[in-house]
Amino acid sequence: MVDKKKETEEQIFEAAERVFQRDGYAGARMQDIADEAGINKSMLHYYYRSKEKLFQKVFQEGMRQFFPVIFNVLSSDLALIPKIEALVEAYYTKFEEKPHLPSFIIHEMNQHPDRFKEFMKTTSFRIPEQFIKQIQAEMEAGTMRRMDVREFLINTIGLCVFPLVARPMIEVVLGINDEQFGMFLEKRKKELPKFILNAIQK
Amino acid sequence: MVDKKKETEEQIFEAAERVFQRDGYAGARMQDIADEAGINKSMLHYYYRSKEKLFQKVFQEGMRQFFPVIFNVLSSDLALIPKIEALVEAYYTKFEEKPHLPSFIIHEMNQHPDRFKEFMKTTSFRIPEQFIKQIQAEMEAGTMRRMDVREFLINTIGLCVFPLVARPMIEVVLGINDEQFGMFLEKRKKELPKFILNAIQK
DNA sequence: CTGCAATTCAACCATATGGTTGAATTTTAT
DNA sequence: ATAAAATTCAACCATATGGTTGAATTGCAG
């Protein structure tokens, strides 16, 4: 019966993930989460005491999916070029399942910047030391133009994330539909690394 | 009295702008808007019939500030390099006054993508023809590497916008505070054009 | 089979929220 | 001064929403 308990708890959590990521904290309804989980509202409070607590879990789990995707790749042993290719690839495959995650993180971090910063610090999400050294080595060796590593990282992440959070805008400006957007991202997987590599080449 | 009327209507609108852009549609409270405007709730409904209607105005005005910033610069007569510099400059000075505008637009466009797309179409926000021709000319002349114009535009906008919507994340990852973030953007005004120009150079 | 713990559900409660009304007061244009 | 418009205020309404409760049901160990 412990198994069954875990199962239900898990179902609720996954439902909460979908609803919160789609609607945001303020827009999410506990009833919607219950419906999505196929259970009754009382269960939500039986397992998680309040909307706030349930949200915290969803948000923190979202963070754990959002940042390690980047940092794990960054701290790998790959050379610069395959590393950037892997980073782009990781982004665009990871968020296929959870398309709302990037905009969710961005929206909620802006709603409660202090809480967000606190969480980032306690979980020690940092720029991997390994990556900083790698970039510096490339610059020393003259295989990459000199620039601020942080600036480079922000640009790279921004280039990956932006299309995912600006999807409706991109669809209308490019005059494409949802299906074609998928193709656009596929093509982008190949084009974006070129753009980034060109930007840092001497 | 027409003047006074306009004045109050304007005050309400500006208050609504601040509250909606900060809290989003779902998070905004009509009472908060009334307080912010220094008037009472009845006035909101006297001038704007409902939360929804007031929001529509705020959102549409936000769009008119967000897109023409880009498109006016893009369709100007500037050469490519000063144009990119002007674009970055325009972004980072424009949104100093309304720091929440970019994340507001992104959040709400994702909440109602169809409504958003409809609005974009009726107001005919498009990639300026002038700009497309300019880029193609550069590529013909061999002063720029061949790439998809749309891809180039999305990258440029993404690079401008991302820091503005990911501010808390950037502050914590770089270990800086709000004041230092301002300096970061100042420095970025100079660095970003270099990055972009390098990325499209042959 | 039985009793206990886990689980479910419907009904309910208190509050927040968007919205309305109408009368009283103030401001403004003429 | 007067009429029209603008503004304020308090009270009110209907609904939505987060949260609670207790009885009923289910599942499992003994």
Image (cartoon, coloured by chain):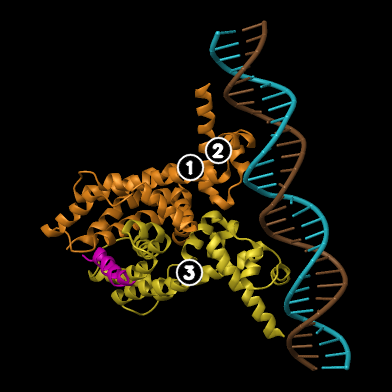
Chain colours: A orange, B yellow, C brown, D cyan
Q: Which residue is mark 2?
A: A48
Residue type for callout 3: Phe
Above or below, comparing residue D29 to residue B109 in the picture: above
Image x and y of residue A58, in percent: 48, 43
Between tags 3 and 2, which lies in front?
2
Q: CA distance from mark 3 to mark 1?
A: 34 Å
Graded by Cα atoms within 10 Å as few (under 14), some (14 to 19) or many (20 or more), the crowding at tag 1 reads some
Q: Which residue is mark 1?
A: A57
Q: Is residue B201 magenta?
A: yes
Residue type for callout 2: Tyr
**Which residue is painted at 45% across and 44% down in the image?**
A98
Left or right: residue B42 versus residue B29 is: right
**Which residue is painted at 36% across and 60% down in the image?**
B171
Q: Which residue is mark 3?
A: B66
Q: Are marks 1 and 2 on the same chain?
A: yes
Left or right: residue B12 versus residue A107 is: right
Image x and y of residue A119, in percent: 41, 50
Between tags 3 and 1, which lies in front?
1
